[in-house]
Image (cartoon, grey):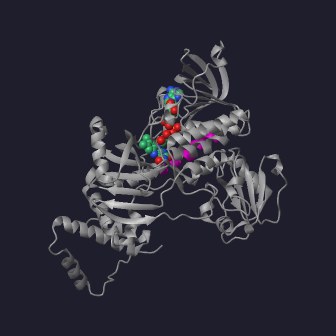
Amino acid sequence: MARKIFEIPLYPYRRHPDQDESTPVRHPVIVIGAGPVGLAAAIDLGQQGVPVVVLDDNDKVSFGSRAICFSKRTLEIFNRLGCASEMARKGVQWDTGRVFFRDREIYAFRLLEETGHKFPAFINLQQYYLEEYLVKRLRALQEEGRPIDLRGRNKVEAIGQHDDHVTLEIATPDGPYNLEAEWIIACDGAASPTRRMLGMDFVGQVFADNFLIADVVMQAGFPSERWFWFDPPFNRGQSALLHKQPDNLWRIDFQLGWDIDREEEQKPEKVIRRLRAMLGEHTKFELEWVSIYTFQCRRMEHFRHGRVLFAGDAAHQVSPFGARGANSGFQDIDNLVWKLKLVLGGKAPETLLDSYDHERVMAADENILNSTRSTEFITPKTETSRIFRDAVLDLAERHVPVRPMINTGRLSVPAIYDGSPLNGPDSNVLPESLRPGAPAVDAPLSEGWLLDRLGNGFQLLLIDTEAVPEKDLSGLGIEPVALSADESPEFAERYLGEAGQAVYLLRPDQHVAARWTVYEPEAVIAAFRRATAREEA
Amino acid sequence: MAKLITTPNIADADAFYAALMAAHEGCSKEESDALNARLVLILANHVGDMNILLQALELARQKA
Ligand SMILES: Cc1cc2nc3c(=O)[nH]c(=O)nc-3n(C[C@H](O)[C@H](O)[C@H](O)COP(=O)(O)OP(=O)(O)OC[C@H]3O[C@@H](n4cnc5c(N)ncnc54)[C@H](O)[C@@H]3O)c2cc1C
């Protein structure tokens, strides 16, 4: 087997001049952890011109096989960050899903997607590829002179919070050194040492489970499908999932339950026996990767602690059903970076960062709720819930209406920040799906895609309005984007609905801040002040 | 908001009750439990309206 990307150092240790300074050097932002979430943070900050140092105690992409399913919103965020096309090109999709109950198939369905979006609902792509593309993008930005500094084998060992800065003690192969930062983004994963060093709890363990992950190479011709088993003969009382990854690789997840013998379960004979029962005696396969992961479902009470902001698995952890882990971590970064940039630039008060906590805690709760519901269905906890679960599966074969109740994980969709303190006025004649707090939905334009035009700064989307503001509205840095309903039927339907004209104030993360059916500069300015926490509700 | 029907609505109540009993005839406890669950799911889908379903659940939860 060729050396896998996760075995090659991508950002080997290099001694940095900071290590020779007698007094610790202070940086505006330090990101702890160069996992997918930390890398996304670094790219976003660097691309916006905010100098950033990223520290990781490793020098490679994350080891082995982990996430594979990345959502449309993730691709949209990486589109804004300039690295989605490679992901979309390499990623694959399954087109048919099959659901099995015990020893039989109960139904199959085709994947039907809404058209008129640049990106598909999701792609399957190995996490190590995604991280590799992120490192490449980061390198490309460095080549352009963007201020990103990625330091491998820099392990954060101690952290101290002060009024206007944070201090870090860092271990390297050359010995320790100290740094200071105005702000820290802690992306150091589920076991977050930062969280531990600050003595923060990781509360609300909703459930805990073990999963056996097997990656197998199969002959070409094995169908590109997603198979989900409830209570199969080869994994009694649990579930199993098979889906496709690029490179003729299939991912198989066996849920194992809590009380297991990890060593026993990982023995190749045992795994191969399960796989034979699952794939059929005649399917030829080669086992490429086996490991066991433990999941819990919980979050920190708050994601902001003074000058330390937690993101990704460090802040929240969910079960794998619905692929909400990394996908939600990228949305954390999408939400946080523009706020941090405004605060660092003195253009918004620090309290803007409290809205990060508000909005992303809410999103984490939504993710935990969804993954808890999936788990409840997949692993019923009481006799009654098992009776109902089995009734749904029994009926589904012949009675189509109960099929929507079958919950094998609900694919990650972006959170709508209803009730956010940043939200301004709404207009109830415009489509509900684009209410304040919602992410802008993509649509085809006469040339290209709407989302290619949005993001990175505040924008005012004006659709068929009579008045159009001057460039850079009142010097506030709001860019007007005037479009017509004629761009495409999808655009008109998604943004106007029944209305004849519309005005949307959009945040740098493409979420709607406020909207109206007429353009009034004062209203826009007030909503802008609110969306940047410069005005109380 | 739509309201749960709380007045008699089945023309021949005796006939419905007899049909319900007949459906369970010869079932073990386990089979009956499964049948009841399927019945709830089929009827719930027929009703569809979440408000009505929540009112029905609430009413069913009340004990004498
Ligand atoms: C089997 C499996 C399947 C999954 N499937 C999906 C999926 O389909 N879709 C999805 O969205 N998510 C999925 N997830 C979840 C996803 O892998 C995680 O959510 C994601 O890796 C979190 O990224 P992160 O950057 O927050 O943390 P991590 O990837 O854990 O990265 C943390 C980084 O911090 C570094 N670090 C730790 N301590 C220190 C320190 N003291 N100093 C410096 N650096 C430090 C580590 O070296 C590491 O690089 C899956 C996870 C698993 C295990």
Q: Nearer the viewer, residue A451 or A512?
A: A451
> Would residue A415 be seen by someone viewing this image from the given angle?
no
Mainly helix, strand or loop, the magenta region? helix
Q: Quadrant of residue B31?
A: bottom left
Please tell me whether residue A284 belongs to the stretch shown in magenta: no
Up the image or down, A188 lies above or below A402; here it is above
Residue lying at the far bottom of the rendered structure:
B11
Task: Answer left or right for A434 relative to A57.
Answer: right
In percent of width and height, residue A164 lies at 65, 26
Q: Nearer the viewer, residue A47 or A275?
A: A275
Residue lying at the far top of the rendered structure:
A22
Up the image or down, A227 lies above or below A155; here it is below
In percent of width and height, residue A379 lies at 32, 52
Q: Which residue range is magenta in the image?
A: A352-366
Q: Name which residue lies at 68% across and 69% down.
A: A489
Q: Name which residue lies at 56% across and 49% down.
A: A90
Q: Name which residue lies at 75% across and 56% down.
A: A523
Task: Answer left or right for A527 relative to A331.
Answer: right
Q: Locate the C terminus of chain B by quadrant.
A: bottom left
Up the image or down, A462 lies above or below A268; here it is below
Count of numbered circles in the view: 0
In percent of width and height, residue B19 lies at 22, 81
Task: Answer left or right for A22 relative to A319.
Answer: right
> Would residue A210 be seen by someone viewing this image from the given angle?
yes
Please tell me whether residue A364 belongs to the stretch shown in magenta: yes
Q: Nearer the viewer, residue A35 or B14?
A: A35
In percent of width and height, residue B30 lies at 19, 64
